[in-house]
Image (cartoon, coloured by chain):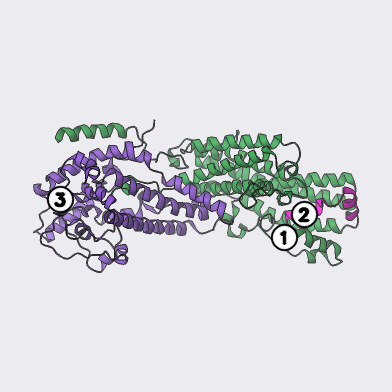
Amino acid sequence: MKNFLVTAFVIVMTFTGCGDNAYDGETGLVGNSSTIAVSAEDTFKSLGSTVLAQNSSNAVTTLKALQLSSATLKSDVSSANLTQVHNDFKNFMMAYKAVEVTYIAGDYESSLSDTLRLMDFFHNTNEDIPGQLDVVLESNASVNDLMFKNSLKSINALEYILYNRELSIEALLALMQNGRLLEMADVCISKMITRLETIETFYSSFVFETNEETAKENLSNILKDSAFKLKEWRIGDAAGLTAKYKDSVSSERLEYRFSHLSLEAIKSILVTHKKVMNDDNSNDFGDYAAARQAQSEVQTIRTTIDEALVLVESIESNLEAKLTSSEVETLYNKIDVLQDSYLGLIIGALNVTAKIIEADGD
Amino acid sequence: MAINLDFLYLFDSHQRIYWVYLLAALSIALIYSKLKPETKYFTKAIWWHPSAQLDYKYFILSLFIKVLIISPLLISVNEVAFFVVKFLEQNLVYHDRLLLNKTTIMISFTVILFLLNDMTRYWLHRLMHSSDILWRFHKIHHSAEVLTPLTFYRVHPVENILFGLRYAFTAGVVSGVFVYYFGAKVSVYEVMGVNVFLLFFSLIGSNLRHSHIHLSYGKFLEHIIVSPAQHQLHHSVNSMNKNYGSSLAIWDYMGNSLKCYTFEKKMKYGLGTTEEKVSHSLSALLFHPFNQK
């Protein structure tokens, strides 16, 4: 008996040396930052300035540029000026998408929790925004009075106002001649500037690194959420790949269906994910997570983002023309992998791992 | 190959025989012995009984069985949680994450996980008794004729697998639902790195459940929490079909299987005379269920 116990004890001690008792053997975002090389403080400080603050500032700047070019167009309705407005809208939309991907301000400041929701109604309303805007356009009443609803001062409303593809460019320019359409655009732009400046102000003094746990949780949540919406709403629903719209393809469900900028929006989202997870110039969230035993998820996320970006670049025309293509289906599947990997980060960090006690009797 | 062996149990606060919990049980036992001097627990007759010796040997053997055979077979909590989140995302209408504060989420999660985990433990334990096939495996645990803290580990590998799967599914479903609604803010409320409920029940004498210290909590509390004495009743020949609960007695109360402790001069443990005996050997513990007529 004694020999048996001594031998067994030695074997147990030997095997214990092979184990990592701080971790359950699966990957996931865990670990104590005080003992890890990639500093949480550096990482979140960098993300706070180069992503959160920078992106909100870009959104305000690009929207102000759009306001300016829209004013120019109002004073001189010409094809060249309309093209400039369209370019500026595209720049703003892409800058805005970058803000949306990492929008965590609402998690810290409750007054900001609905700010983006009030300026973006994609998948957020059943209202007929184009129909209501047409009524405003045809009315003689004050534009400001008629556009009292938030949905009519949103990016979706602005897109319809500036692009309405039912009309030819010539017809759109003719419609802009009396100034009412561009007055409507200005109502949208002004309101969105106010909203985005509130966000910009918040981020400019925001100390992201104050609480590592909260920062990690909020960022993981928003990235996973962004991947889900990208896959389901921005690609799958239109391409007939989601459970809800299985085999029912419709470009009407694309996010920027009037401007045909849905592909650019997807690109901007992916570029922002890359900036957060794989920034060559500073510590990013990928470095942070990889240093905390989530190497496999981080590796998958980085590879998938790169592959998805290559796919997006390879689609030469707009997304509307490619909805039934194999590239779009592959892109959808890539984003599914991305979403799963973010979910893996979150679930891997749960502290409910089965301990052997749960397999024992009573 | 990374082998994860969290099994140096004495120094693992998630294990029943973590030294702090043993110390707490010992303290309670010493106070109990002082108050009831007739208690004869620290005797060779108990601690060196052939049944106890078998518990010690089987404990060592079971470490290897669990790490090398059972753990790789079990689906993990994380895998179940992952599947649940994906299923909910694909089948429910999207909603934004619910913005509750972290403490509220943590407390809700910890309480719900504890309740459901304890409830499924009760029902599986009860099933182990009521099913003829499962009883073959569970009777290994009940074949102990004296009770020591290591009797807790006297469990057939098949039962280990069943209880491990039960936990994976229970914790996986609860975790999945919480992650679906609250994302990364979900976590268990821990004190000193241990689930607060595990810590509480361990400190009030979980290790005395398998002992000869008949610590009762009184009739009122024994309708809520399972006392060591109630679990000893469950191990006794006469009340084996009572007190299936682990932490909470409410499941026994609701399932009509509750028995509060009343003094019994001589409580006899083991399988009694009506059951086929399991001999005191490692091979018998492992193979008896398959050889039974």
- The residue that disc 1 covers is A151
Task: State the CA–CA distance, disc 3 to disc 2.
Answer: 80 Å
Q: Which residues are magenta?
A: A148-175
Q: Is residue A4 above or below residue A81?
A: above
Chain A colour is green
Which percent across, then down, holds residue B242?
24, 61
Q: Is residue A362 visible?
A: no
For the point 24% across and 38% down, which residue is it? Answer: B61
Task: State the CA–CA distance, disc 2 to disc 1.
Answer: 10 Å
| Number of residues whose C-alpha sits closer than 10 Å to that of mark 2, classed few (under 14), some (14–19) or many (20 or more) | many
| Front disc: 3 or 1 | 3
- The residue that disc 3 covers is B145
Instruction: Determine if the magenta segment contains residue A324.
Output: no
| Foreground of the two, A1 or A218 | A1
Q: Main secondary structure of the magenta part?
A: helix
Task: State the CA–CA distance, disc 3 to disc 1.
Answer: 74 Å
Q: Residue furthest bottom?
A: B220
Chain B colour is purple
Residue type marked 2: Leu
> Left of B291 or right of it: where is A217?
right
Contact between marks 2 and 1 (CB within 8 A): the answer is no
Contact between marks 3 and 1 (CB within 8 A): the answer is no
Residue type marked 3: Glu
Residue type marked 1: Ser
| Foreground of the two, B133 or B155 | B133
Could you tell me which chain the residue with mark 3 belongs to?
Answer: B
Could you tell me which chain the residue with mark 2 belongs to?
Answer: A
| Labels 3 and 2 in the same subunit | no
- The residue that disc 2 covers is A158
For the point 50% across and 43% down, which residue is it? Answer: A345
> Left of A78 or right of it: where is B118?
left
